[in-house]
Image (cartoon, rainbow, N blue to C red):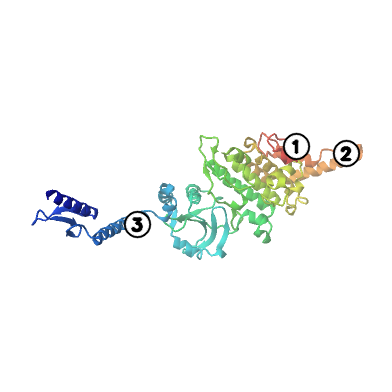
Amino acid sequence: MIEMKYNANFTACSKCEKSGGRCGSSSQKPDKFVCYCWDGPRQLECSQKSQSGIGGVLLVLVVLCIAIWYRKKKTGHSIFRTRCTSLDSSASDLEYGSKFYGVTLFSYTQLVKATENFDQANELGSGGFGTVYYGKLNDGREVAVKRLYEKNYKRLEHFMNEIHILTRLRNNNLVVLHGCTSHHSRELLLVYEYVENGTVADHLYGENTKSGFLPWPVRLRIAIETATALSYLHATDIIHRDVKTNNILLDSNFSVKVADFGLSRLFPTDKTHVSTAPQGTPGYLDPEYHQCYQLTNKSDVYSFGVVLIELVSSLPAIDMDRHRLEINLSNYAMNRIQRCAFDELVDPQLGFASNFKVRRMTILVAELAFQCLQHDKEFRPSMDEVLEALKKIESADYEALQAEEMVHNAAEEVVKMHIGNTPMPSPAEDDHAKLLSNHQLILSSPISVIDKWISGSTISSNSK
């Protein structure tokens, strides 16, 4: 009898525990089995209704906890940080740096209003990192607003680089950064001074060629001012890394403003180079940097050499319609300079055939570009040397040189009349050397551009 009662209680207790209850007995009748459930005591087992109630409550609690955790995570990180979690420290650095360097923080709403909601009619141009729009601030200032395409790692790096580089520089030939948006803004925007006359590229072979032709004196002044800006950058241990005519802006007086420092690098003073993956624009990229992954300030010198050739020739750095070995303007120019075929290189509209001064100056600038375009960086001049050479080319006494040429030509005629047709050395062969030696235009270089352009560093395909 006792055994039967025990078995019955054991079976009831098992059912009770399986239903989520706890086994026990009545306080009034100790020998009576009771199943204590969440919603009260039961005779045998907890009801399914009580179980589903417990499950429902637990489910609600779990969902509520997840919602609270997600909300905290979302409110604790801005859009900027959630997309760039690896750069949280950089974002805070920007906020600190902008205050430290004195950069004005603009609101997104301000710049939307200034650009008329980024109206396409206000678009000034676009590049690899973003589109630039014309804008007018509430205080009447005209500005250029760069709107970065996306807030991914590279765009953020570009944004940060421009701020850290430009806020430490002060030079009349560098574009001025007025400010930027905060990292809490909907978009990353940079605000620059508005430079109204467009880019050098526009004036050489772009849309602005319709409005007028850039005469040679203006082109030489552009070269000198650009070299001044680059020389200043190198003196402050900065490599621009994207020197090109599209990044050289012109104001209303055709004065130069070098822009776009998104790829620029601070150069350690105790290093000969920085090892980094090649970045830049095709047609301007230093071949040694491209092959060896070694960035130096001579990489800017190479790019500037391409700019000099563009100023002389009015041709773009890349042209797919040229011969396949001369798609790059650097190859096209090197081939003609090596053959002294300057008449094939210089834009005839500059007056190469009719103006002695223009002819001599364009030849000398082309020769200087030849030095800048040497394949081996050790054979290229520094930007300081390039700047000094350009200034001397601009200030040389070309009237005296023209008089010398006239005397030379007259003497040659006399010789022909008296001793036959054996020609004297032609002005085309010796006037370059006279100008360089008499006026010391080009500083000493491992490569003499006067010596029939012989260079062990020149790519063999260039002469074919």
Label 2 is placed on what type of residue? Val
What residue is disc 2 on? 415
The percent position of residue 118, horizontal first and vertical second, equals 52, 63
Q: Who is closer to the viewer here, 412 or 97?
A: 97
Q: Is residue 356 left or right of residue 229?
A: right
What residue is disc 3 on? 71
Q: Are marks 3 and 1 in contact (CB under 8 Å)?
A: no
Q: Secondary structure at mark 3?
A: helix
Q: Is residue 182 left or right of residue 52?
A: right
The percent position of residue 424, horizontal first and vertical second, equals 84, 38
Residue 122's label in the rendered image is none
Write the residue at 65% across / 46% down.
306
Write the residue at 32% across / 57% down.
63
The answer to which quarter of the image holds residue 130 is bottom right
The answer to which quarter of the image holds residue 75 is bottom left
Residue 452's label in the rendered image is 1
The percent position of residue 31, horizontal first and vertical second, equals 10, 53
Q: Mark 3 or mark 1: name the one nearer the start of the chain.
A: 3
Residue 332 visible? The answer is: no
Label 3 is placed on what type of residue? Arg
